[in-house]
Image: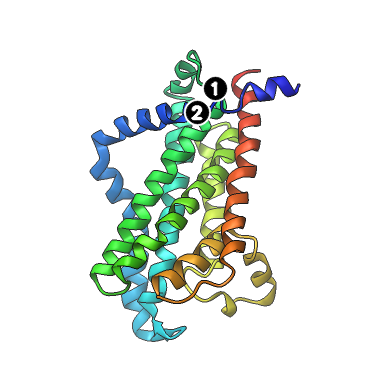
Amino acid sequence: MWKLYAAALPANGWNWVAVWRRNYLAWKKVALASILGNLADPMIYLFGLGTGLGMMVGRVDGVSYIAFLTAGMVATGAMTASTFETIYATFARMRAQRTWEAILYTQVTIGDIVLGELAWAATKASLAGTGIGIVAAMLGYAEWLSVLYALPVIALTGLAFASLAMLVTALAPSYDYFIFYQTLVITPMLFLSGAVFPVDQLPGAFQHVTRFLPLAHSIEVIRPTMLGRPVVDVGLHVSALCIYVVVPFFLSTALLRRRLMP
């Protein structure tokens, strides 16, 4: 049994690059539309809530509400971009387009494909999160260097949510099931993780739940970085995100092996 699962793990440390490159070359043809699409949702939150609600709220944690919201939208942009890339585009390559089937005729394993897909989703997450950060810096809501400092955490956030979404992709029979993940997991996480308002405004029970949410750990690093404040418990938050990368990766690889190679 172990040999069967081992055969689905990455064959080496570089095969995944071919999968990443294949996705990149296909994406280049629609790059502008893809980037604008990934930026649209968090930017609507940023300017809609930041300028409208911000006039009523005033200052939050010692800064303007829109500056507070910006860091949350950077993490949210990374979450959204990597999630949608994985549950829709990756699922299409696996099932409708049968791209994975063609790749598996080569020396590339399922683990190599999954790793390449996660790396590609993290790349798109980095572009989305950095794009929001650049807009915020241009408007004076963040320092330019802070966007650069936050980039590793943005990429790690993309990896974490891509890994979680890959688990959903491995289990979903069709596209119709992804709406449950969006509405029951992603959307509630947006409002429970401190992206839109401080976590300490939540009821006590929800504050305990927040400690286990990957988006909350991402925001706890990105927000103080972008506001020029010291990051507290950075090792804890980064470790939590790494767990969300590694554990779903192995679970999804095992499930995909059973699905694609019965």
Which one is nearer the viewer's eye here, 243 or 13?
A: 13
**Mark 2 falls on what kind of element?**
helix
User: Which residue shows up at 56% across the image and 65% down it?
Assistant: 234
Out of 3 and 42, give the one closest to the viewer: 3
Q: Residue at x 74, y 24 (%)?
A: 2
Can the viewer see residue 145? yes
Q: Which mark is residue 98?
A: none
Say what amino acid the circle numbered 2 marks.
Ile
Which amino acid, by three-letter code, is at mark 1?
Thr
Instruction: Locate residue 27 relative to residue 194 in the image: left or right.
Output: left
Q: CA distance from mark 1 to mark 2?
A: 6 Å
Whether 75 is drawn above or below 56: the answer is above
Instruction: Name the residue at the right extreme.
Output: 1
Image quarter in which the N terminus is found: top right
Q: Is residue 45 left or right of residue 31?
A: right
Q: Position of residue 176 (x, y in %)?
A: 52, 38
Image quadrant where one finds the C terminus: top right
Residue 67: % across, % down = 36, 75
Query: Image quadrant of residue 78?
Result: bottom left
Name the residue rendered at 55%, 43% in the picture: 163
* Left or right: residue 164 compared with residue 89: right
Q: Dividing the picture into quarters, in which one does residue 129 lie?
A: bottom left
As displayed, is residue 227 above or below residue 22?
A: below
Mark 2 = which residue? 113
* Mark 1 secondary-structure assignment: loop
**Dot 1, crowdedness within 10 Å: few (<14), some or many (≥20)?**
many
Above or below, 198 against 33 in this view is below
Residues at discs 1 and 2 in contact (Cβ within 8 Å): yes
- Can the viewer see residue 57? no
| Residue 198 % position (x, y) | 52, 76
Q: Which mark is residue 109?
A: 1
Q: Position of residue 252 (x, y in %)?
A: 61, 35
